[in-house]
Image (cartoon, rainbow, N blue to C red):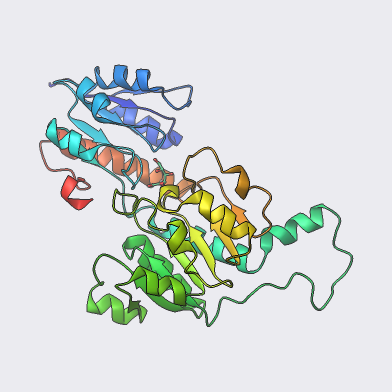
Amino acid sequence: PTRKPKVIVTRRLPDAVETRLRELFDTELNLSDEPMTREALVDAAGRCDVLAPTITDRIDAGVIEAGGERLKLIANFGAGVDHIDVAAAAGCGVTVTNTPGVLTEDTADLTLALMMAVSRRIVEGARSIEAGEFKGWAPTWMMGRRLSGKRLGIIGMGRIGQAVARRARAFGMQIHYHNRTPVSPRIAEELEATYWESLDQMLARMDIISVNCPHTPATYHLLSARRLKLMPPHAILVNTARGEIIDESALADLLAARGIAGAGLDVFEFEPQVNPKLLGLPNAVLLPHLGSATVEARTEMGEKVIINIRTWMDGHRPPDRVLPSML
Ligand code: 8YV
């Protein structure tokens, strides 16, 4: 029998996933669950066949090269691969896979939750109760804005963007989107979605903007200081994608100056650091990267990691292979 591949998993995963990983492979877990240092990653890459990292691991060219002849597969736990140098991996003959699909619905749910939290002032309201500020109902106290009838502009109409659109339609919102290319006529019709080739023009005309594109060199600071200012003062911005897509410092200034009405952010430019200017703003709802944080999604993400490794082990092309040309 051929030896089991050595798989190094950089963080703790749900119990059922870890159990299965141990059954199938010669698995090494990072029992501390602390994010690995670069030194530890370099060391790990050099003594495994498969590295299973997460967003907290920067898999740069140096780490990949440290994998030498042995490292063959980087099976990422997560959909986004902006922390992995996919081109360097391809250059070294290392396959990269991710876990798309299984976190789509949960990330879309959280996107709508943030829209509601900001527009209906849910966190502000809850805090006011805690602070003993609720002195009785009043006709004009803590009025928010309704979602129904509003124009939602989705940046990035992939799986998650479309799942956000379906939910938003159920809330009575009108769907607009900016994407590299328009979606298929069937999907455009199903979602009654309007395509905006110009992001600038879309930003100026929406009530709510949702960021749902991947972070790539092309989308870094896509929402720059200049573009953020194109949004009207009543607009709400929600980001469940990646912090780097927005100029976070410019956004914090805009929110403080009430240049837009509010923001719901699940991701930050320099995670786990949050720009101090964002803290304490009543019109910003901040969450600690919870998009896929459900037992179901995290378990299914682990199962996808396992399927990708097994398929590779059997000499086939893993289902979720990521190629540099896809980014
Ligand atoms: C994960 C995510 O929490 O999949 C992604 O791209 O951002 C989240 O689902 C994280 O990336 C896990 O590595």
Disc tally is 0
Q: Quadrant of residue 9?
A: top left
Question: Where residue 151 sits: x, y (%)?
Answer: 47, 78
User: Vertically, is 96 above or below 199?
Assistant: above
Of the four image quadrants, the one with ligand 1 is top left
Residue farthest along the front direction in this orientation: 226
Q: Residue at x 42, y 58 (%)?
A: 223
Question: Where residue 23 sits: x, y (%)?
Answer: 31, 28
User: Vertically, is 88 above or below 284?
Assistant: above
Question: Where residue 212 sits: x, y (%)?
Answer: 39, 59
Q: Residue at x 80, y 57 (%)?
A: 129
Q: Quadrant of residue 211?
A: bottom left
Residue farthest along the left direction in this orientation: 315
Q: Residue at x 38, y 70 (%)?
A: 200
Residue farthest along the right direction in this orientation: 135
Q: Residue at x 45, y 77 (%)?
A: 205
Question: Where residue 2 sits: x, y (%)?
Answer: 13, 21
